[in-house]
Amino acid sequence: MKKSTSAWLAAAKDDLLLIEQIYQNEALTHLAAFHAQQAIEKSFKAVLEEFDDVVPRVHSLEHLLPRIQAHFEFSANFDLLEDLDKLYIDARYPGDLGLLPQGKPQLEDAAAFKEVAEGIFRAIEKKLILMQKVSD
């Protein structure tokens, strides 16, 4: 595995560690969502980095997903990815605080975002490690 790929995965893991600390705090659900989006984005970019694809300077999961699917397929709740994209953009502006259509993410939302981010990270990390072992 490339050093730069490992760096993307390490950055994604940091976001996951942060989510673990805050996702059950009702006051921080929007930040758990923000970091879930970041963990997934960085995981996707690790795939692009490993396969010598250009890593775009975009943040949209919906934009990145088709680019990584050429290299890696996985199952995920695509509605949650769409919600995370919306929350990520809105969370950057304090007045919106990363709101869902029904308002601030609830504790159940934060737990779902955490779960999808962890699942995507684990699947990508596992595949990249397996590929490394095969090539060694």
Image (tube, rainbow, N blue to C red):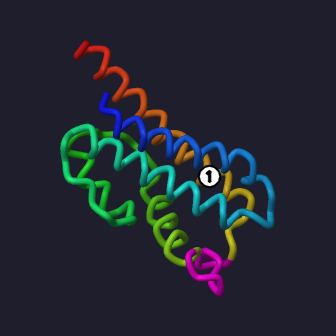
Q: Nearer the viewer, residue 93 or 72?
A: 93
Tell me: 12 left or right of 54: right
| Number of other residues with Cα within 10 Å of mark 1, as a class: few under 14, some 14 to 19, many 20 or more | some
**Quadrant hosting residue 133:** top left
- The residue carrying mark 1 is 112
Residue 119 in the magenta stretch? The answer is: no
Q: Secondary structure at mark 1?
A: helix
The x and y percentages for residue 42 are 43, 50
Q: Is residue 21 above or below residue 38?
A: above
Q: Nearer the viewer, residue 21 or 3?
A: 3
Which residue occupies 71% across, 56% down? 108
Q: Is residue 28 above or below residue 74?
A: below
Tell me: 92 left or right of 124: right
Task: Tell me the chief SS of the magenta region.
Answer: loop
Which residue occupies 35% across, 43% down? 46
Q: Nearer the viewer, residue 4 or 15?
A: 4
Tag 1: amino acid: Ala
The x and y percentages for residue 16 are 60, 45
Q: Quadrant of the C terminus?
A: top left
Residue 98 in the magenta stretch? The answer is: yes
State the residue lying farthest toward the front.
3
Which residue occupies 26% across, 14% down? 134
The x and y percentages for residue 52 are 19, 42
Q: Is residue 22 above or below residue 52?
A: below
In the image, which residues are magenta? 92-103
